[in-house]
Image (tube, grey):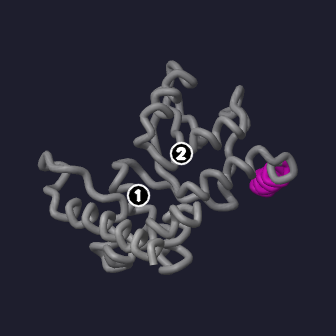
Amino acid sequence: SAPHADLQDAVRAITSRLDAGSSAVSPRAGGRRPVKFEYLVTRGFITRDQLAATTVEAREQQVSVVSLLIRKYDIPKPDIGLALSLFYRCPFVQVDERTIISPYLLTNLSADRLRRGGWVPLSREGNTLTVLMHDPYDLPEVDALGHLFAGHKIKLAVGISDDVVRLIDETFQPGLATTARSLFEDVESEGKD
């Protein structure tokens, strides 16, 4: 059938790109950068064909490749994070329910703006602002960060896109933010006793 042939063609095209990327010289030696999930392939979590098929399936289902890698192949988030860190050449930050964004970092920012950009400010130490992004190679957004936080040194970190969106939603949802803040205050007050 035609859709099946189209799917096979797409898988072949992605597999050939993956194969071409795997023969590249190390990026430090002046070669091309690695394929996004090359680490997962080289470590045996998934084959190139499975990765290609997962990429096509994610596009068809309009979900992230990462969510399918976790769901279908039980690949642990820290390993996906390492693959992302190697690809984007910046630290990976795993977000969980204990991750709280300080309200002072969100001044003049809306949940819609952060969701559209795929980033959220995580912390500030002195003049350095750490920003969690799902795509640190998104140059228009990185440029926008420089304008939004003029005078700050921006340190990028990569996160899993679904987790970044969830963190934004939980940060801006008043019920959850209030609960998180009261939990944080409870922990702080327990430490003072």
Q: Residues within 10 Å of mark 1 (few under 14, many from 20)?
A: many
Q: In which quarter of the image is the C terminus?
A: bottom right
Q: Quadrant of the N terminus?
A: bottom left
Residue at 13% across / 56% down in the picture? Answer: 25
The answer to whether residue 20 shows anywhere in this view is: yes
Residue found 33% across the figure and 78% down from its top:
47
Disc 1, SS: helix
By secondary structure, the bulk of the magenta-drawn segment is best described as helix
149 vs 90: above or below: above
Q: Is residue 185 magenta?
A: yes
Q: Give the range drawn in magenta.
A: 178-192
Q: Residues within 10 Å of mark 2 (few under 14, many from 20)?
A: many
Q: Is mark 2 on a helix, strand or loop?
A: strand
Residue 183: which numbered mark, if any?
A: none
Q: Nearer the viewer, residue 39 or 99?
A: 39
x, y percentage for residue 127? 50, 27
- For label 2, the residue is 132
Front residue of 15/70: it is: 15
The residue wearing badge 1 is 84
Asked whether residue 189 is in view, the answer is: no
- Dot 1 and dot 2 residues touching (CB under 8 Å): no
The type of residue carrying mark 2 is Leu
Residue 92 part of the magenta-drawn span: no
Q: Relative to the observer, which residue lies in front, 91 or 45?
A: 45
Rounded to the nearest angstrom, the CA distance separating label 1 from label 2 is 12 Å
Residue 53, quarter of picture: bottom left
